[in-house]
Amino acid sequence: MKNKLLIILLITLLIGPTIVLFRHEVDFKSHWSNADRASTNLAPTPATYKAAVIQIYAARTYNWRGLFAVHTWIALKPKNADRYLVYQVIGWRKYWHLPVYEKEQDIPDRIWFSNKPWLLKDIRGDAAETLIPKVQAAIAAYPYKETYYYWPGPNSNTFTAFVARAVPELQLAMPSIAVGKDYLGFWRVFAKAPSNTGYQFSLLGMFGILIAREEGIEINILGMVYGISFKPFGIAIPGLGKIAFSRK
């Protein structure tokens, strides 16, 4: 019986990544040194759009890890600024003995090493102008700027989820495949959901449950999330993410 349960668990953990593989959703051909990093034109141009902007992006991670997870980052443009500030946590910096946290003036909507990004949140105008100082304060308070683990965290998604919890007005529902988003630290097991519309219990980001209006119900097993969402109605499958059966 135990062997059958293990086989079922293994199949359900791998079916999503297998579908992603055969859909060619992850680029395996490009080397990181020559991978596409062009703009996707999802962000307004500072030269013509003077109002404040907050954008949060996700893209499949580089190489085989993209079968299981996404990388997320935050882009801010204060009012009248001529460039975006991009904030993110990048694992490879650790191997160059650099802080894994990175802040730089950059193109906010870059393709992530040949994997196209999508918008998780797009706030503009007065609302963005009000929230930018709060987001920057949350970024400054992130406690793992020198620490990175692909699994179970802290990683790039731990960073974005931390900021989301600290700024309730963002109401950011992280993708179910944002591995690391449920990492709360070594001693903490209870927290608000990243969207701040519910709560979660998590053991080091490896096991837990989340119940929230925006995310729905998520069950975390070894960092992989199974779930049911209600806005819109759908299911979450490890590696594949949320599949919607109805519109919002």
Image (cartoon, helix red, strand yellow):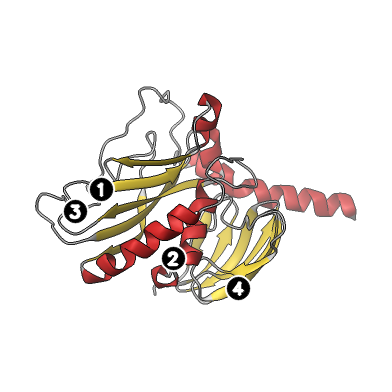
Discs 1/4, front: 1
N-term mark: 2 or 1 = 1
Task: Residue under label 3, please give it.
Answer: 44
Left or right of 79, for residue 108 = right
Please determine whether, in this image, residue 208 is positioned above or below residue 58.
below
How many residues crowd around disc 4 within 10 Å: few (fewer than 14), some, or many (20 or more)?
Answer: some
Q: Position of residue 35 (x, y in %)?
A: 36, 28
Q: Please give the label number shown on residue 2.
A: none
* Callout 4 secondary element: strand
Residue type at the position of mark 3: Pro
Task: Residue under label 1, please give it.
Answer: 84
Q: Please give the label number shown on residue 172.
A: 2
Q: CA distance from mark 2 to mark 4?
A: 13 Å
Residue type at the position of mark 2: Leu
Task: Residue under label 4, please give it.
Answer: 199
Q: Are marks 3 and 1 in contact (CB under 8 Å)?
A: no
Q: Position of residue 41 (x, y in %)?
A: 22, 47
Q: CA distance from mark 2 to mark 1?
A: 20 Å
* Image quarter of residue 184: bottom right
The residue nearer to you, when weighing 179 against 137, is 137
Please determine whether, in this image, residue 170 is positioned above or below residue 71.
below
Q: Residue at x 59, y 57 (%)?
A: 237
Left or right of 101, for residue 134 = left
Q: Residue at x 62, y 68 (%)?
A: 191
